[in-house]
Image (cartoon, helix red, strand yellow):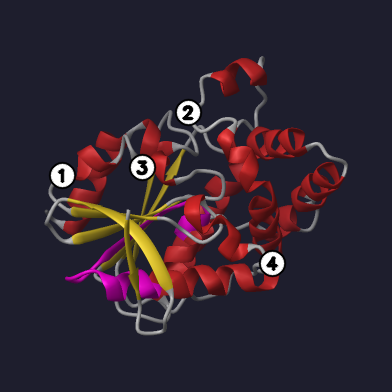
Amino acid sequence: MQPTQSTDEIDVEFERYGDGQPLLLLHGGMAPIEYWGPVVPAFEGYGAVVPQRPGFGTCLDSAAETSADEVLDRESRYVQALVEAVDGDPILFGHSYGALTAIEAATTMSVEAVVAYEPAVLPGEYRADADLADRMASLIQGGKREEAVKRYIEQVLHPDGIEDLDAWLAEWPVWPDCVALAEEVVRMNRSVEQYRLPDRLDVGAPTLVLSGTDGPDFLRQSARNVHDALPRSRFVEFDGVSHSGPAEAPELIAAEVDAFLEK
């Protein structure tokens, strides 16, 4: 992990793979940097940059005092610091909450392009009843941290239900280490529940918005809503791919990204 500091004195940590155009890979609300392990080889023509975001890994304590109101701004400033720390014109590729972060960061800075896989944005009718953050916080307060994280996994990764969640978790590479992220996931969920998608997103860079037919319906709808709010956007939906699309079908998604960027 390569540590550095931006001109705004924000400490950033990242791993870089390859010497091509920098491709900043921004993971979502529950996945640590290991999420991108299967993805990086599919983007060998780029200089993949995998950061350690605030609230994760060695940066876990740095987010402890961050409120839900501040999370998205903190993440956007961190992305700006990352862009300053790498050479070349970067492409931002975000998954879930990382996709929302990439889009928000691109409203205040110049980047080559943005790729957003199912941005963590709630449609208005869904947001009105969203209470995942409250349910998780209540479980954590009651000492049930694992149960809190399981509620997130059930709602976001397996919205249609799963026959044996414990068996699935036993095969999930980041379980149970991700339980340490429970409070940060609550903050991010509150941030998502509070976020209001504007009619127009002021992003100058061309943006590729991606989704999968097997992901949560509300995120598929939100991906389309984000696409409609962007001035320069292409929308692509992958048949049979879930919310974990980048890690689940990296070569398929990399081919679409290459076509979009005309590489």
- Which amino acid is tagged 3? Trp
- Which amino acid is tagged 1? Glu
Say whether disc 3 or disc 2 marks the residue closer to the N-terminus: 3
- Which amino acid is tagged 4? Ala
**What stretch of residues is rendered in magenta?**
80-99
Q: Residue furthest bottom?
A: 7
Cα separation between marks 1 and 3 = 13 Å
Q: Tell me if residue 44 comes above or below residue 48 in the rendering.
A: above
Q: Which residue is mark 4?
A: 68
Q: Is residue 119 left or right of residue 127?
A: left
Q: Is residue 230 visible?
A: no
**SS under mark 4:** helix
Q: Tell me if residue 209 comes above or below residue 65 in the rendering.
A: above
Neighbour class for label 1 at 10 Å: few (<14), some, many (≥20)?
some
Q: Which residue is mark 2?
A: 173
Quick check: marks 1 and 4 in contact, CB under 8 Å? Answer: no
Neighbour class for label 4 at 10 Å: few (<14), some, many (≥20)?
some
* Picture quadrant where residue 116 is located: bottom left
Cα separation between marks 1 and 2 = 23 Å
- Which amino acid is tagged 2? Pro
**SS under mark 3:** helix
Q: Which residue appears at 42% of the width and 71% of the height?
A: 11
Say whether disc 1 or disc 2 marks the residue closer to the N-terminus: 1
Image coordinates of residue 131 in percent, x first then y, are 80, 51
Q: Which residue is mark 1?
A: 44
Q: Is residue 142 left or right of residue 93?
A: right
Q: Which residue is mark 3?
A: 36
Q: Is residue 252 left or right of residue 175?
A: left
